[in-house]
Amino acid sequence: MRGEELKGHLDAMLLAALESGPRHGYAVIEALRQSTGGRLDLPTGTIYPALRRLEQAGLITGSWSVVAGRRRRDYELTLAGRQALSGRRADWRDFSAMVNAALEGSPWPSPA
Amino acid sequence: MAQPRLITGYLSALSAQLPAPVVAELADGLGETHLHYLRQGLDPDAAARAAVAEFGEPSLVIAGFAAVSPARRVARRLMATGPLVGACWAAALITGRAWAWPVQPAVVLLAGLVLLASIGLIVSAVAGPGYRSVVRAGLAGCAGVTALDAFLVVAVPLTAPAIGWLTSLALAASLTRLMFSARSLRWCLADAAFNLR
């Protein structure tokens, strides 16, 4: 999937990649690749500014460590980040159900 | 293990624009990407080429960080609110016949130059691709607007023969923007503190 198509969804995908625990930037990218079956097609370097934006928004928090002589920044979800991810998931389910209903003729889920 | 020249060159291009902690984080990611390709059996130079290609052009990465810098956020807000504050002051100064106020022409000229320079800096901070230039232009533009607002808030009540409702509105707009500028400075300082870590 190309970057243009990912616009608006990348933040939620990054939050989801951090849901299972802290990860550094490259591990976040690897997790995204694995979860998307390798179909994610984004320049790796552009993930880091997105992580910075999420950190500025208070959705993730970063901490430094030193691994093999290199400085590494690990990220983890904050409480606000978990709440944001939950909200994004619910929005996405509604959105995808609506698009599926329009494109595939699948029935619109009835409210519980 | 010594890094291939391609990777050190890539990191040098990033270092020319981005703060050291950001480059350190990117260097770690690029190092991991390089290792990933080495594990796949590529020779060091081919792995470096693959890692750099996967990371994307340095200009793309730099533009990504410029886009999330607090200086750009501040510049965007100043650009969005500037026309409104400017319109308030234009209306206040025209209806108050400001050209008849006892103000030195040199002061008016200086204020006009600061205004023009601030607008140019803010536009540059919003549209510029370089990280350092965005930060410098954003901070300088914010400082220029702050100086102008402070000047208007102090000088107009002292100079104007009467303060009408339009002038009061313009003064309120400038005071609000002064408070916003103080907050903006705090964001930028927090970002600078991160970049010193």
Image (cartoon, grey):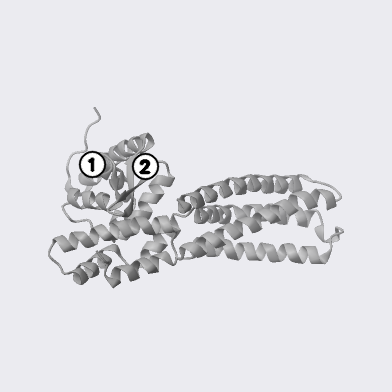
Chain letter of disc 2 in the image: A
Which comes sooner in the sequence, label 2 or label 1?
2
Where is the C terminus of chain A found, in terms of image quarters? top left
- Residue B195, position as x, y percentages in the image: 46, 53
Indicate which label's residue lies in the foreground, 2 or 1.
Answer: 2
- Residue B137, position as x, y percentages in the image: 56, 62
Q: Mark 2 points at which residue?
A: A60
Left or right: residue B99 compared with residue A79: right
Pick out the residue farthest to the top.
A112
Q: Residue A97 carries which label?
A: 1
* Number of other residues with Cα within 10 Å of mark 1, as a class: few under 14, some 14 to 19, many 20 or more: some
Secondary structure at badge 1 equals: helix
Where is the N terminus of chain A found, in terms of image quarters? bottom left
Residue depicted at x 44% and y 54% = B68
Secondary structure at badge 2 equals: strand
Q: What residue type is labelled 2?
A: Ile
Residue B181 appears anywhere in the view? yes
Q: Which amino acid does label 1 sit on?
A: Ala
Q: Does the residue at mark 2 contact the one at mark 1 (Cβ under 8 Å)?
A: no
